[in-house]
Image (spheres, coloured by chain):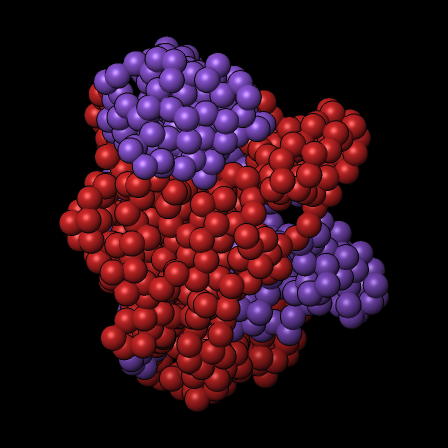
Chain colours: A red, B purple
Amino acid sequence: MLTVAEALQKVQDCVAALPPRVVPLEQALGCLTAEAIASDIDSPPYDKSMVDGYAIRFADLMDGVAELRFLEEVTAGEVPRIEVVPGTTTRIMTGAPVPAGADAVVMVERSTELPGGAIRLEDQKSKLGQNIVRRAAVMRRGDAVLPAGKFVTPTVVGLLAEVGCADLRVVPRPRVAVLATGNELVEPHNKPGPGQIRNSNGPMLTAQVTRTGAEPVVLGIARDDRESLRTKIAAGLETDLLVLSGGVSAGVLDLVPSVLTELGVREVFHKISMKPGKPLWFGLRESANGRMTPVFGLPGNPVSSLVCFELFVRPAIAQLAGQPLPAEPQYRAKLREPFTHRGDRPTFWPGRRDEWDRGFFGQAVQPLRWQGSGDLRTLVDADCLICFPAGDQAYAAGEEVDVRPFC
Amino acid sequence: MLTVAEALQKVQDCVAALPPRVVPLEQALGCLTAEAIASDIDSPPYDKSMVDGYAIRFADLMDGVAELRFLEEVTAGEVPRIEVVPGTTTRIMTGAPVPAGADAVVMVERSTELPGGAIRLEDQKSKLGQNIVRRAAVMRRGDAVLPAGKFVTPTVVGLLAEVGCADLRVVPRPRVAVLATGNELVEPHNKPGPGQIRNSNGPMLTAQVTRTGAEPVVLGIARDDRESLRTKIAAGLETDLLVLSGGVSAGVLDLVPSVLTELGVREVFHKISMKPGKPLWFGLRESANGRMTPVFGLPGNPVSSLVCFELFVRPAIAQLAGQPLPAEPQYRAKLREPFTHRGDRPTFWPGRRDEWDRGFFGQAVQPLRWQGSGDLRTLVDADCLICFPAGDQAYAAGEEVDVRPFC
């Protein structure tokens, strides 16, 4: 059986970034740019006033006081029509173009309107060029303002809007299909009958997909028959990644691997040396255009499903988005109480780190009283998984263990 | 003028969590629960098999080997019909109910089907009760499984789905309206004419709202006239919070505060001692039902707008969502190069922390070559704001300064 590290390596080797696509700017947040962006404007596009005030010839204010003839008012969105000549001034709004002839702007707070309409200005500390940003001071038309491979933050959105990039080429958000399988499943709003349980994996995995930034495609429940599985799985293979839950252990009704094979999905691995999550299945489907669609078959037990998603599906989604996750940080923490690990597989056990070391992770961790892979209730209080290596071992309180915080 | 801390305190004093509302489970991710949730089921709902295998009476396997008569097969979703009596076994799938009479399950890997249909089992390490989770081991019908005031993670979604909570009362995601104002603005896909610039604040603020987890409501551009402003602002006041940009400095066309007053928005403060962002306007509108709608008027310069959002709007949105942000962590970092601060207001200057201290923040920070509040281009490379206190001061390389990482 593969180790967790070997399996993760195989996933990483198999998954490539999605082909770039042009999207509207408002859909680009969180994506990676796939082209360099040049500005189509000078910024500012003209000599611009930084304040509301009066545009003047600086020479008129040499002694700090001036009384000037009023020419016109230029609000934002307007252009000045009259040149400022000695002894005159134009009222100008923040962001408006500075009129020809003017070489400084005095803030409106330092002005008085005199009877008759002349303007008195007082500004003892004035300087040539004050309150003016020169045309193209920030960028020049044609300047490359953003390289390819940049993560689109709100600031990037603002910059791209400014330079007229209303559509751009990005690595798109992956579309990730979620399909729960099993005759025993009913949807959460239904009351389970004898032998039935609710579909908790579907909504949980959908929420996990949402949290990665990808777009979930909800396929509902497939029943344990070839026709139902084939239809739903085929729909899932139209997306960028398919996550199934259930149907991958060794039972006679575990048709999932066989239907996957029928639909052209090639198995890369099945089963991993870990607990929970041992039955994990991973494969690839080559589509007509040569794209490889990754397919994960997660175990049906909710915690196994949750943990396999965090360990394997999340990194695969990040790679599709062109944003591979950094190597897993290893946090060490001291156990708050003794713990006995048993079993020949490494175990990921739910734990809770102490409040006082939040933000720095680790240092102290409490193993929770967990009932196993069907027990989501305890998981709600967990904020990390404690990683116990394979083998029977009794840990004392205070011993250091590896800890993996939840995303 | 208010300090940043005083202004933030006023915002916090004015903004309360939204009234709880019932939403479908699939919309609850990221919200705060507003009611305690009890389970409507036992979990597991029956004694459940943890593996694919054979349900037996443990006494039949005392010496580690048994040959048993095959009774029936129970797949997930089915219920056993026949009691397991001495000398018999039922094939059972993972998750299926254990038949009456059985008190252990042997994994399918340890079985052989004999000619004639009998089943041979070998399991030297078997134990009474093995591979069975008892009914209600995880939770009992009526158990409170989640208190009010819990943040809804994917794990919580899974648990709520399991216990039949398909709709629940939460503090809803705030709806936040974004409105840019100004005659000089054109939308990003248009080419600015003379005196015009593109609306970069609208898309940027919308992206910032999205990143907080709130739902943005895009109102586009209002022109600098009463009618246009009144219509758009009235629409914005129907949401949970209104963010305007532009129109709050001191110019004659800055109609925004006056239209806000007309529409019943009471000014709480106008202007803050900070740079950029001094003209920030904040007010409240009491609606018919007694709810207070917060309204922010951000300065029109893009970086001022960005910074005011981070410092004031983000905390307000978090409070509406019932998830107040923790007190601002103060990171200290050593300046990579000398820096001279001038001015009578504290300055938030874009900086970049070093790669090697990422994850722990601070320690070393590079002030970027920033052209002021119109310069978004430089901001794209920033990952923090350096906070310089008011007053002229020359800082040497290696001096420690306060740093505020971007969210």
Q: Judge by depth and name the residue closer to the eye, B234 or A374.
A: A374
Q: Residue at point 65% right, 64% down?
A: B351
Q: Judge by depth and name the residue closer to the eye, A348 or B296.
A: A348
Give coordinates of residue B332: x percent, y percent.
75, 52
Quarter where residue B75 is shown: top left
Q: Is residue A95 above or below residue B399?
A: below
Could one spot residue A199 in this view of the protein? no
Q: Residue at point 26% right, 16% down?
A: B82
Horizontally, is B7 left or right of A320 in the view? right
Give coordinates of residue B40: x percent, y percent.
32, 16
Give coordinates of residue A401: x percent, y percent.
72, 39
Quarter where residue B292 is shown: top left
Horizontally, is A348 left or right of B161 in the view? right
Q: Residue at point 48% right, 62% down?
A: A11
Give coordinates of residue A16: x percent, y percent.
44, 70
Q: Residue at point 49% right, 71% down?
A: A150
Quarter where residue A241 is shown: bottom left
